[in-house]
Image (spheres, coloured by chain):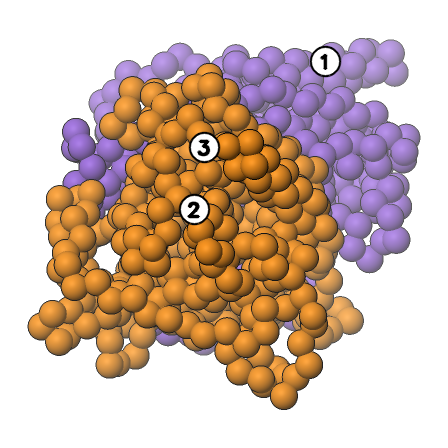
Chain colours: A purple, B orange
Amino acid sequence: MRAYDPQSVGIVEKHYAHFDHPLALRSGKTLERFTLAYETYGTLNADRSNAILIFHALSGDSHVAGYYTGDPDEKPGWWDDAVGAGKMFDTRRYFVICANVIGGCQGSTGPSSLAPDGKPYALRFPVITVADMVAAQRHLIDRLGIDRLFAVAGGSMGAMQALQWVVDYPGRAANCLFLAATPRSSTQNIAFNEIGRQAIYADPRWNQGDYYGGEPPDGGLAVARMVGHITYMSEHSLDNKFGRRLQGHDALPYTLLEPEFAVENYLHHQGEKFVQRFDANSYLYITKALDYFDIQESYSTMAESLARTSTDTDFLVVSFSSDWLYTAAQAQELVSALEHTGRNVSYHAVQADFGHDSFLVEVETMTHIVGGYLDAQWALTQESLAAD
Amino acid sequence: MRAYDPQSVGIVEKHYAHFDHPLALRSGKTLERFTLAYETYGTLNADRSNAILIFHALSGDSHVAGYYTGDPDEKPGWWDDAVGAGKMFDTRRYFVICANVIGGCQGSTGPSSLAPDGKPYALRFPVITVADMVAAQRHLIDRLGIDRLFAVAGGSMGAMQALQWVVDYPGRAANCLFLAATPRSSTQNIAFNEIGRQAIYADPRWNQGDYYGGEPPDGGLAVARMVGHITYMSEHSLDNKFGRRLQGHDALPYTLLEPEFAVENYLHHQGEKFVQRFDANSYLYITKALDYFDIQESYSTMAESLARTSTDTDFLVVSFSSDWLYTAAQAQELVSALEHTGRNVSYHAVQADFGHDSFLVEVETMTHIVGGYLDAQWALTQESLAAD
């Protein structure tokens, strides 16, 4: 049994919430019933006012922090640096919730789940949007008896969900934390996602999505992951980490099939790790949802869509200078539109070298910004309660 | 029969030069014999002093300009805007040569060529470098009886060859034109190329390179091309060209398998076009050569490698602000090292929106810069001859 850092949330458990009613989707289709896998950390206070819903990114899941077993080799959740005692989402004060998105493959209903006919959905799974992901989680928050979240928060696709939440459910979150993301997927964002999907389609094992029980399309999915991964790192961080260093050789071996440069080996490793934990069809559906994402869809301007949010909801927006997937300019478009709409918004343009991954890697800076923002907003809420 | 623009070089012919001697390669291996496919435009003058050797990029070939047939639907060579009467490489004055690189698939010896045993080389083809490509072309220039080229020139991988030429064959070119390129492939450059290769390897039809006479790995090669293509365009130019425009629909159809956004359709089209004209094994070998490229390899500094060039060789370097494949910073590293070495270098940092493709697309600017540079250098040469 390992000894946990006193800041760690320690051993945690995955819960499942089953919903036996249909979920109406943006596409016009319906998901007959659905399950959400979720985890919680910290304790919900008596007046249910301290809950923070964290949304995960493309390849994430409900396991934000802590460990499932006592195995010393087990890695903690994907944002363990962020959730725990004294961390940016301080579990001594907040009750943190995270659910696997619908369309995912870590316990929530997705293409690998069994349809009502007892067979995997595969491509019969309906196309989903970020709004649909959020709609499913709204049912979970209802079931947990939480009327108003203290905050919704996320990085990357998680931030898109947070923004969609405050537009679609005005008044149901006091704060929206939008980190390393865009209010609208760009042409280049769509292009990179489509290349990943094409890599999966090109794998004959994909078999039009019908591979459950057989060999999954690991080759195509690994290439898709490599394409994605390269967009998460900056040119500088790749150069800094690997440069032109050779893999296991002092001089170039001049060979075609083995990795010669360390960066090639790294990419292979990323691809191989990913296929062990992710479903190719989920990758297709979730990247589609990313492409569809445009907070101003069905509104004539971004400000008009943001005017749907409650005037009581405040915003934190953080962008990273070297993030070329979701650029500072994209975040600034949101900030301008929020200001235009009269919302309170704190914006931090962080100088950071790690590209899109900066929101996960720059722990000290993020603890300062996110933790500081939440502290201040919490204090304001308490003052306001005391004054009532 | 079409009517040609008076600036066009008109109907041209592909020539083949066969070399029955071995070519020693950087890897230590040897190519037993080799053929170079090449084209020429304009007329070699009496003292053989007006020749310009243009090198092509990854997906290019010897067909720089003009047409093979009179078919009105035929597209001209890949840099037809650059080579012709009054164009940046003015065929009224210069004799322009371009050869398909070894390792290629448009007539020069490559993996799809027959080995001495009468069967295609496939993966038996030796790994090649940019220096090897240049060494092969040195034999062609010898055979054409040209001692000293007026210029070597190229964009992207073509620029790498031009730079390698003046380092490896000092005194055999008066000018080196280095456009939209890097003196050393970066970690990110290698990473993108490796993803393209992995897409090809993941296609079962690739069959360890042994597919000649059967079905080629078009699926994998198309994905590789899409990965490459996206690095040739800027985020701005993609956005400007396609934005979030839908493909053949007024509203999102929410479907998985058809292209929904115009940019997806565009990428598919690029992939489909490419597999009709390119060999997957050539793509592997040539991207490897790109990755190996580092002009200072086997020297302790870049300046030291450049000191090998003739003091009589002058340089033109052009970079493009939105080129994120080969950035202005990479070009500037070369410019600094050239200046440190005491070489004459003209450097233009062009503000352009089209990313890496700018060197092909910004015709007016390039005609001004490249044509102007060549005019001035030609005038200097004539003055110097008159003074002798």
Is residue B41 at least partly visible in the picture? yes
* CB-based contact (under 8 Å), mark 2 and mark 3: no
| Res. B282 image quadrant | bottom left
Chain holding disc 1: A
User: Chain for mark 2?
Assistant: B
Q: Which mark is residue A248?
A: none
- Real-space Cα separation, disc 2 to disc 3, in angstroms: 10 Å
Give a yes or no on whether discs 1 and 3 share a subunit.
no
User: Distance of mark 2 from mark 1, alpha carbons?
Assistant: 70 Å
- When the figure is inspected, residue A387 is found, relative to residue B267, above or below; the finding is above
Crowding at dot 3, Cα within 10 Å, few <14 / some 14-19 / many 20+, comes out as: some
Residue pointed to by mark 1: A376
Q: Label 2, on which residue? A: B149
Q: Is residue A26 left or right of residue B79?
A: right
Local secondary structure at mark 3 = loop
- The residue carrying mark 3 is B313
Q: Earlier in the sequence, mark 2 or mark 3?
A: 2
The percent coordinates of residue B277 (x first, y second) are 43, 72
Q: Quadrant of residue B242?
A: bottom right
Percent x, y of residue B355? 61, 46
Is label 2 on the same chain as label 1? no
* Residue at mark 3: chain: B
Left or right, residue B377 beside residue B365:
left
